Amino acid sequence: MEKLLLSPEEAAEVLGVARSTIYDLIRMRTLASLKIGRRRLVPAAACQELVDRMRLEADSA
């Protein structure tokens, strides 16, 4: 079964960016995340949504 939630490190690896970029995107509310206990997790679907949104913005520019 594929993971539904990714750690910031895993999300960074999936998106090919630095971990600090993931935290910046979360802080700017550009990338959805949730907190479970003390952990900040990124839904795998949110990574795909971010890419899709950025692709649409690039196409419309």
Image: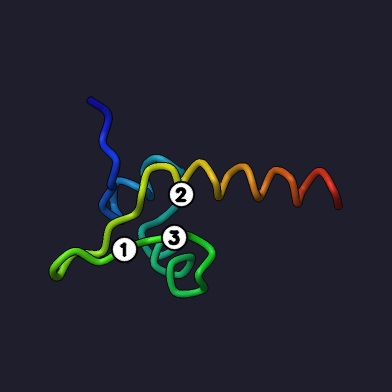
Of residue 18 and residue 56, the one placed in the foreground of this image is: 56
Q: Alpha-carbon distance for marks 3 and 1? A: 7 Å
Residue drawn at (51%, 73%), measured in percent from left and top? 28
Whole-percent x, y for residue 33 in the image: 37, 61
- Rendered image quadrant of residue 19: bottom left
Residue reaching furthest to the left: 37
**Image spot of residue 44 (x, y percent):** 38, 43
Three-letter code, disc 2: Ala
Identify which amino acid the numbered label 3 is placed on. Ala
Residue occupying the far right of the picture: 61
Lower position in the chain sequence, tag 1 or tag 2: 1
Name the residue beneath numbered marker 1: 34
Determine whether 47 is above or below 30 in the image: above
Residue farthest toward the bottom in the current orientation of the protein: 27
| Residue underneath mark 3 | 32
Could you tell me which residue is drawn at 77 percent across and 48 percent down?
A: 58
Q: Return the disc, 3 or 2, that comes first in the chain's sequence.
A: 3
Residue drawn at (41%, 56%) of the image:
18
Mark 3 element type: loop
Instruction: Give the CA distance from mark 3 to mark 2.
Output: 6 Å
Whether the residues at callouts 3 and 1 have beta carbons within 8 Å, the answer is: yes
Figure quadrant of the N terminus: top left
Between 45 and 28, the one lying in front of the other is: 45
**Colour scheme used in the picture?**
rainbow
In the displayed structure, does residue 1 sit left or right of residue 16? left
Percent of width and height locating residue 38? 14, 70
Residue where numbered disc 2 is placed: 46
Amino acid carrying label 1: it is Leu
SS at mark 1 in the image:
strand
Element type at mark 2 = helix
| 25 displayed left or right of 3 | right
